[in-house]
Amino acid sequence: MVRRKHRREAAPKADLRCVCGYPLQRWWPYCPDCGRAQQWRDTAGQIGAECPRCRWAVSPKFSFCPWCARDLEDEGTFSEEPLKAPKGFRMDARCDWGCGGGVQYPMPFCPWCGKDQQWKEEDRFEGSCPHCGRGVDDWMDICPWCGEDATGRDLIPQALRRVRQLLQVARISGWGFRLLLRPGVSGVDPRYPKIVEIEERYVVNVPRRDAIAWPMVVGLISHELGHSFLYHNWHWTRTAGFRRSFGEVAKAYRVMDDAWVDFQRRRVAIAPVNYVSAYAARHPEEDFAETFRFYLTRRGRLRELFTELGQKRKGVIVYQKFLALHEYVRSLRGAR
Ligand SMILES: [Zn+2]
Ligand SMILES: [Zn+2]
Ligand SMILES: [Zn+2]
Ligand SMILES: [Zn+2]
Ligand SMILES: [Zn+2]
């Protein structure tokens, strides 16, 4: 609901807030913080009408409600011809369906022909909602468009529970990371080390939820957490101990992971000799993320891991990588 302290002429930048106090953008159906449904009415009477179904502000010229798609042709003085921008609205684009009318961002429906509209939101938001596909920012808990969990964490509860358990038994304390299900590719941007994006296609729109490869999802999350952990503890990469085990890492490397097949293996690969998996050989940062994944999914149990490394005749350097990580994790515990 819009709350205005003073009514000013030509004051497009009203301070729009949810009743919970959270700042909103006009025409968001939900508050991204508390999830309350919003109703953008025409309380000031500047637009001229309200939709009889959703009660949102509409122009009396509209043939359809651009917010809920209700047919308005029985209501008052609609225009025979599609218009560009009746009073109270601007034209940001023409209707996707070519009816000739104008539509204003972020109308989901054309007010002239009632058909649904698509908006390019890449420039307006950091990502997109795994439930409805519209733009959301990384910090949003609730999608302002569909009111569902904007992070997508509600779609992977069993994987999250498992990862939390593993972090606990491996005695790695959390560093405030934030998991987000997003389309495209899994990865961590070094500029935002706590934001861990997980490719949503493994769990979104899958025909059968019981066919989801949960161990792979857990492996993928563990791998990405490795990147996040390293960016978060970047000073460690400058030490001799780290360099001896993993080599030089360069922060310019933007992680984009696509080898999910590798991430579902719970057992160390036989080749290559000096890495835990083939993927780890791609880059020192991948080497670390893969070592971290094995360390985490194998509960930090070095003895068990080392037995396996011995059976597979892995190089001494692989033992060193696990030891370096183990020591570092222990030093973090000691520091607190
Ligand atoms: Zn709110
Ligand atoms: Zn409506
Ligand atoms: Zn149209
Ligand atoms: Zn949504
Ligand atoms: Zn990676």
Image (cartoon, helix red, strand yellow):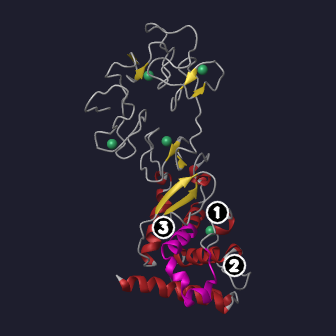
Q: Which of the marked residues, 1 or 2, is nearer the chain's N terminus?
A: 1
In front: 32, or 220?
Answer: 32
Whether residue 136 appears in this view of the structure is: yes
Residue range in magenta is 222-250
- Tell me the residue that label 1 is attached to: 256
Image x and y of residue 157, in percent: 46, 57
Mark 2 or mark 3, which is nearer the start of the sequence? 3
Quadrant into which the N terminus falls: top left
Query: Is 219 situated above or below 66?
Result: below
Q: Tell which of 77 and 149 is nearer to you.
A: 77
Q: Pointer 3: residues within 10 angstroms few (<14), some, or many (20+)? A: many
Q: CA distance from mark 1 to mark 3?
A: 21 Å
The secondary structure type at the circle numbered 2 is loop
**In magenta segment, residue 68:** no
Q: Quadrant of residue 96?
A: top right
**Relative side of 205 to 232, left or right:** right
Badge 1 residue CB within 8 Å of ligand 5: yes
Where residue 77 appears, x then y in whole percent? 46, 7
Image quadrant where residue 110 sits:
top right
The residue wearing badge 2 is 269
Name the residue furthest left. Answer: 5
- For label 3, the SS is helix
Magenta stretch: includes residue 243 = yes
The amino acid at mark 1 is: Met
Tell which tag, 1 or 2, sits nearer the viewer: 1
Q: Amino acid at mark 2?
A: Ala
Amino acid bearing label 3: Val
- Image quadrant, ligand 1: top left
* Structural distance between the alpha carbons of marks 3 and 2: 22 Å
Instruction: Name the N-terminal-most of marks 1 and 3.
Output: 3
